[in-house]
Amino acid sequence: MKRDLVTIDDLSDETLLGLMDLADRIRRQLRGHAADLPGTLMGSLFLEPSTRTRLSFETAMLRLGGRVITSSDPKTSSASKGESLSDTIRIVDSYVDLTILRHPAAGAARAAAQIAEGPVINAGDGSHEHPTQTLCDLYALRCERGRLADLRVALYGDLRYGRTTHSLARALVRFGASVLAISQGDLQLPKFVLNDLRREPGYAVAPVALVGLESVLSRPEVPALWISRGAKESSEVRPMSLDPDSIDAIYVTRLQKERMSGAEPLGSLPILDHRFLAAPPFRQTVVLHPLPRVGEIARELDQDPRAAYFRQAALGVPIRMALILWCLGAVDLPAGAAPRARDSVVHGFRCENAGCISVLERGTIPPEVTRRGADDPRCAYCEETAVLAYGGRPFPEPA
Ligand code: NCD
């Protein structure tokens, strides 16, 4: 079976850890791998802007001794002439051994993986997922904190449209993390992510009002969710105070303005600076950001040892080298059990999310719905649940 990476749930815990161990070994001799994949060709197809993801993938392949072809400007690719994703993928897949795809539509990577004969890696699909950024984030957490198990991580910023947090939250709870999701306005984690977090054994999602952080955070317009083993589901917002030095890492994201309709009530979150990190729960925190930052983190923090975002970005190369080796079958890693296996596939339904590939390319991509549990049907591509309809009737909302 070919090894695609569409969602972070395509990798078992064992494989994730195996990739990090391999990246550790690679990092010791980053320049010593030029004979690993001679003659192998990678296609990087980026139909949305990117700096780090594309360049770190390409660096990774070149350091492994392979070669790269790139389409990095959507305006110069045939997609701008109206070519379907299916046709583009069929062609690129016939040229190369491995395809890296970034696409503005949610679910594009799944569609591509179904079409391509070679492996496809999702380098970000709309506001859905960004699993290789999560590999880099988890690896950075393990390097900075010395472990992955049972961390307390605050996600901070646009959690609705920021795809990196969707993959990251799903992975963190698999390693026992407690996640504090702090967003602004309407930009909390989407339902499909929250439902998966709730489904993790022992986990619940509790709306909280953070107290004791008046100097930096306690404002009525800053809603937070505490996602943890032992949290209590409730419709009521309960006050919560954090212990000193209790947050291991804060993961900051920018507003994904390019994905917003403009109608979202936004509010604003305080910028991360020395004053913010002086609040007792954050004194020992490590600061992560997938980058690019556009003002969420003060530049004064760049010299602070807690600022790990540039170290995090540098880890993108060895972890992607490990991933490429694995996807191409050049290394074997422990297989482990697939997390959150998809349940039954239901036909005859269709997605109505305007940002979903199965809607944007209706006719070439057959709609598909999967069910997780009895009452959680979701589009197999974008996973948005609320917009599915069958015979004009919406699915029942999960209880
Ligand atoms: C992120 C992305 O593209 O989703 N960037 C990245 O890949 N490092 C985050 C962002 O654009 O804000």
Image: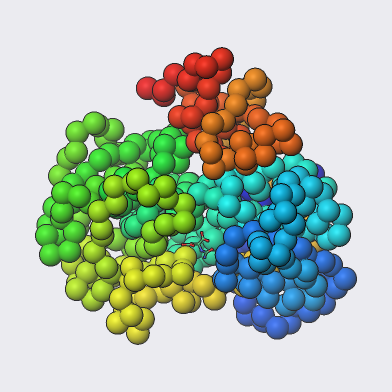
Instruction: Pick the quarter of the image with the N terminus.
Output: top right
Left-right relation of 330 to 28: right
Q: Residue furthest front?
A: 81
Instruction: Pick the quarter of the image with the C terminus.
Output: top left
**Could you say which is closer to the camera, residue 129 or residue 49?**
49
Residue 25: x and y in percent read 64, 73
**Could you say which is closer to the camera, residue 185 or residue 262?**
262
Q: How is the image coloured?
A: rainbow
Say above or below: 170 vs 137.
Answer: above
Res. 215 in view = yes
Residue 183: x and y in percent read 30, 52
- Residue 18 position by quadrant: bottom right
Res. 149 in view = no
- Residue 391 position by quadrant: top right
Say above or below: 144 vs 370.
Answer: below
Residue sitting at 74 percent across and 68 percent down?
A: 70
Residue sitting at 79 percent across and 47 percent down?
A: 87
Say above or below: 309 vs 392.
Answer: below
Residue sitting at 88 percent across and 71 percent down?
A: 39
Residue sitting at 57 percent across and 65 percent down?
A: 49
Left-right relation of 298 to 57: left
Say above or below: 93 vs 228.
Answer: below
Left-right relation of 398 to 278: right
Residue 299: x and y in percent read 33, 80
